[in-house]
Image: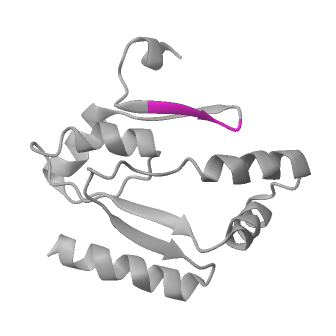
């Protein structure tokens, strides 16, 4: 909490009782030396997008093809409580990005090979 109160994070969120955040200092440090991939919330993507003129940023929004894909992911993560699953399904609807923000969309199907191929198709050209 000290880092949150000290404004050391580009963004932070509470998810399933835990705090998660991204340090702008760490992001800058990584991107000075190499390319990086950061998994962040939509709010974090907006905050990072505000720095797009100082860093080369491409946002990729990964959306599930269906509620079934989310449920399969919950199973994989061991989230079995029906109330928690319902809460997370409802929260998933709010994971969107503003229309004015540039981003690519990858639909996650639950087929690991297909999903990896779709992500690599976007990411590989960015690394060249």
Residue 67 image offset from top left, x and y in percent: 71, 67
Please state which of residues 67 and 19 is positioned toward the viewer in this rendering.
67
Quick check: 116 above or below 22?
below
Residue sitting at the far front:
99
Q: Where is residue 66, by image quadrant?
A: bottom right
Count of numbered tags: 0
Please state which of residues 101 and 31 is positioned toward the viewer in this rendering.
101
Is residue 49 magenta-colored? Answer: no
Q: Tell whether 38 sits left or right of 125.
A: right
Residue 49 image offset from top left, x and y in percent: 25, 44
Q: Quadrant of the C terminus?
A: bottom left
Please state which of residues 113 and 31 is positioned toward the viewer in this rendering.
113
Is residue 14 magenta-colored? Answer: yes
Q: Tell whether 34 sits left or right of 77.
A: left
The residue positioned 39% from the left and 69% from the top of the image is 105
Q: Which residues are magenta?
A: 12-16
> How would you classify the magenta stretch by its main secondary structure?
strand
Residue 47 image offset from top left, x and y in percent: 31, 36
Q: Where is residue 60, by image quadrant?
A: bottom left
The residue positioned 81% from the left and 54% from the top of the image is 79
Question: Colour mode?
Answer: one colour
Quick check: 104 above or below 20?
below
Residue 1 image offset from top left, x and y in percent: 53, 17
The residue positioned 63% from the left and 78% from the top of the image is 110
Quick check: 61 above or below 97?
below
Q: Tell whether 88 sits left or right of 23.
A: right
The residue positioned 42% from the left and 85% from the top of the image is 117
Residue sitting at the far left:
53
């Amino acid at each position: 909490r000290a880092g949150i109160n000290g404004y050391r994070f580009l963004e932070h969120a509470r998810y399933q009782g835990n705090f998660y955040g991204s340090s702008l200092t760490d992001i800058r440090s990584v991107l000075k030396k190499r390319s990086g991939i950061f998994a962040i919330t939509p709010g974090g993507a907006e905050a990072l997008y505000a720095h797009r003129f100082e860093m080369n940023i491409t946002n990729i929004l990964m959306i599930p093809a269906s509620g079934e894909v989310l449920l399969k992911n919950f199973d994989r993560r061991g989230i079995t409580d029906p109330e928690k699953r319902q809460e997370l399904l409802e929260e998933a609807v709010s994971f969107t990005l503003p229309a004015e923000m540039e981003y690519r969309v990858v639909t996650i199907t639950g087929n690991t090979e297909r999903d990896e191929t779709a992500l690599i198709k976007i990411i590989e050209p960015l690394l060249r």
